[in-house]
Amino acid sequence: MTTFNDREKAFEDKYKHDQDLQFKVEVRRNKLLGLWAAELLGLQGAEAEAYAKEVVSADFEEPGDADLVRKVLADLSAKQVDMTEHHLRKKMEELQVEAKHQVMTE
């Protein structure tokens, strides 16, 4: 019975590790997205970092990416930056790959 308990514990530990890793990747992606959008908005330095933190925080409003997309599109639209939801989501996919690479190499 101990072997079964050990396997169960190993699966639980792996699941927890995978969830933690996924969370870190998503937060990193959101920060990268915020920095990218800040550049489009003409923000630099501390202002760009502050905006990136706002973007990261926006993703905690509801499950999924809809809240994040809504915030970034609204901010870009307010500054007359031409951006479609499709283009934004495509950029998010690209940044997801980059974020995973960054997190995995840390």
Image (cartoon, rainbow, N blue to C red):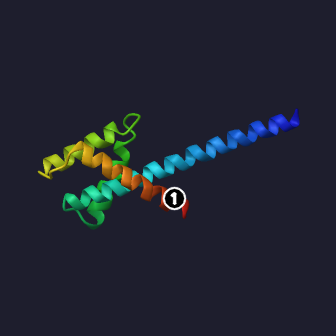
At label 1, which amino acid type do we have? Val
Q: Do we see residue 74 in this rendering? A: yes
* Residue picked out by circle 1: 103
In the rendered view, does 12 fall on the left or right side of 2? left
Q: Quadrant of residue 106?
A: bottom right
Mark 1 secondary-structure assignment: helix
Q: Quadrant of the N terminus?
A: top right
Q: Where is residue 42, by image quadrant?
A: bottom left
Is residue 54 shown to the viewer in this render? no
The outermost residue toward the bottom is 45
Q: Which residue is drawn at the image coordinates 69% and 39% (left, top)? A: 12
The percent coordinates of residue 13 (x first, y second) are: 69, 43
Q: Could you tell me which residue is drawn at 42 percent across and 52 percent down?
A: 96
Could you say which is closer to the camera, residue 24 or residue 101?
101
Image position, residue 58 (x, y; %): 34, 43
Residue at far left of view: 80
Q: Position of residue 24 (x, y in %)?
A: 50, 51
Identify which residue is drawn at 20% across, 43% down: 74
Q: Crowding near pointer 1: few (<14 within 10 Å), some, many (20+)?
A: some
Whole-percent x, y for residue 23 in the image: 50, 46
In the image, farthest residue toward the right: 1
Front-lying residue, 19 or 52: 19
Residue 46 to residue 23: above or below: below
Q: Quadrant of residue 8?
A: top right
